[in-house]
Image: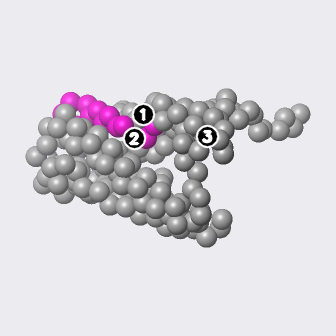
């Protein structure tokens, strides 16, 4: 399993926004880089940029999951899918459904960017008014990364709650 973990850690996908002006790179599932040319950045309106970033988030999720599944399929003779209820029981399906329905959120330090996600598959990026006019593209991208990392942190915290609810608490009381 160590080799699979290493391959997953090295997994990298690159996606392009629907308008083809923004590029995102996802590495290891939890590291995200976004590239927006400053001239392009200042040509957007906040809502349009938020819409492009929201769609980019969806595209990134699909691309990452596709590549992740390929790695998993290669690693296991019989990958575990939800339709194998007779093999794995219903708890795996309940867990995956719970995780898919998690709503996670994060904001930039200055609260000008708010990012929400449902199951990391659906994304909504909201940008405060006049941010583009008064912010450098590089600063915006750094703020966006902060908000996205906070979504990831919120998501991981909630995943533990779903695990506890579906499988029972695995934590040991050390009092």
Marked residue nearer the N-terminal end (1 or 3): 3
Tell me, yes or no, whether the two marked residues, 1 and 2, touch with CB atoms within 8 Å: yes
Q: Where is residue 132 in the image (x, y as percent from the top left)?
A: 19, 41
Question: In this view of the protein, which residue sits in the foreground, 39 or 167?
Answer: 167
Q: How far apart are marks 1 and 2 (CA)?
A: 6 Å
Is residue 20 placed above or below 129 in the rendered structure? below
- Side of 99 relative to 160 (left or right): left
Is residue 3 placed above or below 128 in the rendered structure? below
Residue 123 within the magenta-colored segment of the rendering = yes
Q: Name the residue under label 3.
A: 85
Residue 128 within the magenta-colored segment of the rendering = yes
Q: Name the residue under label 1.
A: 118
Question: In this view of the protein, which residue sits in the foreground, 117 or 111?
Answer: 117
Question: What segment carries the magenta color?
Answer: 119-131
Q: Position of residue 42 (x, y in %)?
A: 14, 47
Q: Where is residue 174 in the image (x, y as percent from the top left)?
A: 87, 37
Q: Where is residue 104 in the image (x, y as percent from the top left)?
A: 46, 33
Q: Name the residue under label 2.
A: 121
Residue found at x 12% / y 54%: 39
Callout 3 secondary element = helix
Question: In this view of the protein, which residue sits in the foreground, 40 or 76?
Answer: 76
């Amino acid at each position: 399993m160590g080799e699979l973990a290493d391959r997953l850690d090295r997994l990298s996908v690159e996606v392009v926004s629907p308008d083809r002006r923004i590029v995102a790179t996802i590495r290891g599932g939890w590291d995200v880089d976004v590239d927006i040319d400053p001239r392009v950045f200042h040509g957007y309106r906040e809502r349009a940029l938020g819409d492009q970033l929201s769609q980019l988030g969806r595209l990134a999720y699909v691309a990452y999951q596709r590549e992740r599944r390929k790695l998993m399929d290669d690693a296991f003779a019989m990958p575990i899918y939800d339709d194998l209820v007779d093999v794995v029981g219903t708890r795996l399906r309940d867990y995956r459904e719970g995780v898919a329905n998690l709503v996670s959120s994060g904001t930039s330090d200055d609260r000008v960017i708010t990012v929400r996600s449902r199951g990391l598959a659906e994304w909504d990026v909201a940008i405060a008014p006049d941010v583009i006019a008064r912010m450098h593209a590089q600063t915006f991208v750094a703020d966006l990364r902060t908000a996205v990392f906070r979504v990831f942190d919120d998501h991981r915290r909630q995943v533990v709650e779903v695990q506890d609810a579906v499988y029972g608490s695995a934590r040991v009381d050390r009092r």
